[in-house]
Amino acid sequence: MSRAEAPAGRAVAGRLGLSLLRSEVGTTFRRWRTLALLGVLAAVPVLVGIAVKVETGDGGTVGSAEGPAFIGQVTNNGLFLVFTSLAATLPFFLPLAVGVVAGDAVAGEAGSGTLRYLLVAPAGRTRLLLAKYVTVVTFCLVATLVVAASALAVGALLFPVGEVTLISGTTVSFGEGLLRALLIAGLVAASLTGLAALGLFVSTLTGSGVAAMATTVGLLIAVQIMDQFPQLDAVRPYLFPHYWLSFADLLRSPVSWDQLLRNLELQGWYVAVFGSAAWASFTGRDVTA
């Protein structure tokens, strides 16, 4: 290839990659299963908000021991319903949804017989796998924002909103509180990228979407259980969900960055390790169906 042809070839490859990514994202978010998962996630803040409103309607209180983190502050400021809902969905509902989408990414195509047709396209296996992963990460972000947006709307409707008293006791404006909520949503989405890479790797190992989804969710549950045992203290800091709830440190002034950065670093390692494993598995796979 001449020097003049090289940029043209890269441009064509780039267009193919973007076209493939748009197709994957569009296909994923048009599926009824994806829409149902997002609908369930959107319903969680509604149920939590109504439960808190009913519980406190006669002057009662909701203590932090009776529900997710921050639930005691919801009646004072509806913005705390965002933090409460993310804390309630992050241990199970959000990762469950991500595990379903990631587990089905490649295995679902293989099971339905469409994977070999996708591989005929000139984009190649590496670009296809990358498009699949970016699509799953996009779902992580959209799912998190759906929870946050639903919680914000319900919180503003059912409870007063205004200045936000952080857990460190500092009071900030509603605008700054809203900005912190947005940052927390982004951090929660980033916290799920390691699980997304793990699910994608599992998806490359089988031709059954159901088996891949079940395996990914099973691993999620097993790791969550392991993270609860003090006897495994030597291992727990390396489990991908260990620092998930560290997003609460963004509600301190000044922000405590230690566990936040550890979480991001840990997710980066999971993405690197299982992303590489998924690439090795997928590029060496004999696709005949």
Image: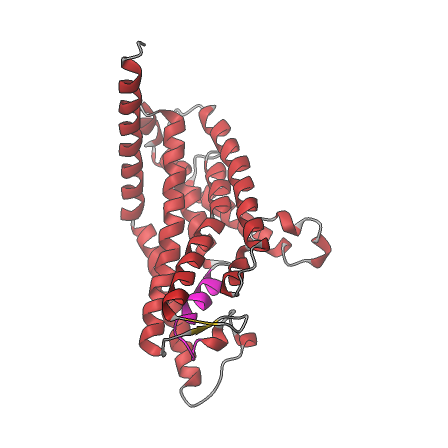
Taking the magenta stretch, the answer to whether it contains residue 157 is no
Q: Where's residue 209, x and y in %?
A: 42, 41
How does the figure colour the protein chain or chains? secondary structure
Q: Where's residue 228, x and y in %?
A: 64, 59
Residue 200 visible in the current orientation: yes
Residue farthest to the top, as pictured: 2
Taking the magenta stretch, the answer to whether it contains residue 79 is yes
Residue farthest to the right, as pictured: 231
Q: Where's residue 120, x and y in %?
A: 31, 23
| Above or below, 221 relative to 64 | above
The C terminus sits in image quarter:
top left
Q: Where's residue 166, x and y in %?
A: 49, 70
Residue occupying image coordinates x 44% and y 43%: 103
Count every numbered label the image shows and give the total. Answer: 0
Residue occupying image coordinates x 27% and y 13%: 4
Residue 40 visible in the current orientation: no
Please provide the residue range marked out in magenta. Answer: 74-89
Residue farthest to the bottom, as pictured: 58
Q: Residue 129, located in which quarter of the rendered image? A: top left
